[in-house]
Image: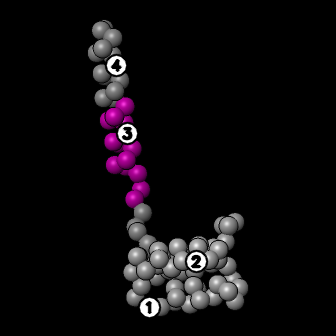
């Protein structure tokens, strides 16, 4: 068999295998905003200087952008646990 044909067949076989693995893998449901806020709150250090960020995350009806903004503010203030 021609070398180019072998390489082409190997490429398509590998690509097919990857597509099958992706199609058959278990897909996870995205987390809700309440879960995201709760998980972000767990990353914040528990001291008086950082409690304001935890309190902001308890606000109902936060969207993803607001949660990320609070996270980045806490990170800037060095209120995110490093060993998580």
Residue at the disc numbered 2? 74
Q: Is residue 71 above or below residue 20?
A: below
Mark 4 or mark 2: name the one nearer the start of the chain: 4
Q: Nearer the viewer, mark 1 or mark 2?
A: 2
Element carrying mark 4:
helix
Q: Nearer the viewer, residue 17 or 3?
A: 3
Q: For this view, does 4 lie left or right of residue 56? A: left
Q: Is residue 49 above or below residue 39?
A: below
Q: Find out whether residue 41 is within the magenta segment.
A: no
Cβ atoms at labels 3 and 1 below 8 Å apart: no
Q: For this view, does 63 lie left or right of residue 83? A: left
Q: Main secondary structure of the magenta part?
A: helix
Residues under labels 4 and 1: Cα distance?
56 Å
Tag on residue 18? 3
Tell me what residue is drawn at x 33 percent, y 16 percent: 6
Tag on residue 80? none
Q: Nearer the viewer, mark 2 or mark 3?
A: 2
Mark 1 or mark 2: name the one nearer the start of the chain: 1
Answer yes or no: is residue 23 visible.
Answer: yes
Residues under labels 1 and 2: Cα distance?
19 Å
Mark 4 or mark 3: name the one nearer the start of the chain: 4
Answer yes or no: is residue 43 visible.
Answer: no
Residue at the disc numbered 1? 60
Residues under labels 4 and 3: Cα distance?
16 Å
Element carrying mark 1:
loop
Q: For this view, does 35 lie left or right of residue 9? A: right
Quadrant of the image containing the N terminus = top left
Q: Position of residue 4 (x, y in %)?
A: 30, 14
- Crowd rating for badge 2 (residues with CA inside 10 Å; few <14, some 14–19, many 20+): many
Residue at the disc numbered 4? 7
**Can you tell which quarter of the image residue 78 is in?**
bottom right
Cβ atoms at labels 4 and 1 below 8 Å apart: no
């Amino acid at each position: 068999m021609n070398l180019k044909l072998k390489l082409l067949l190997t490429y398509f076989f590998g690509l097919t295998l990857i597509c099958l693995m992706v199609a058959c893998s278990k897909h996870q449901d995205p987390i809700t905003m309440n879960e995201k806020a709760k998980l972000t709150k767990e990353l914040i250090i528990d001291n008086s200087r950082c409690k304001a960020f935890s309190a902001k995350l308890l606000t109902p009806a936060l969207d993803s952008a607001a949660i990320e903004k609070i996270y980045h503010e806490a990170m800037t203030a060095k209120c995110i646990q490093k060993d998580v």
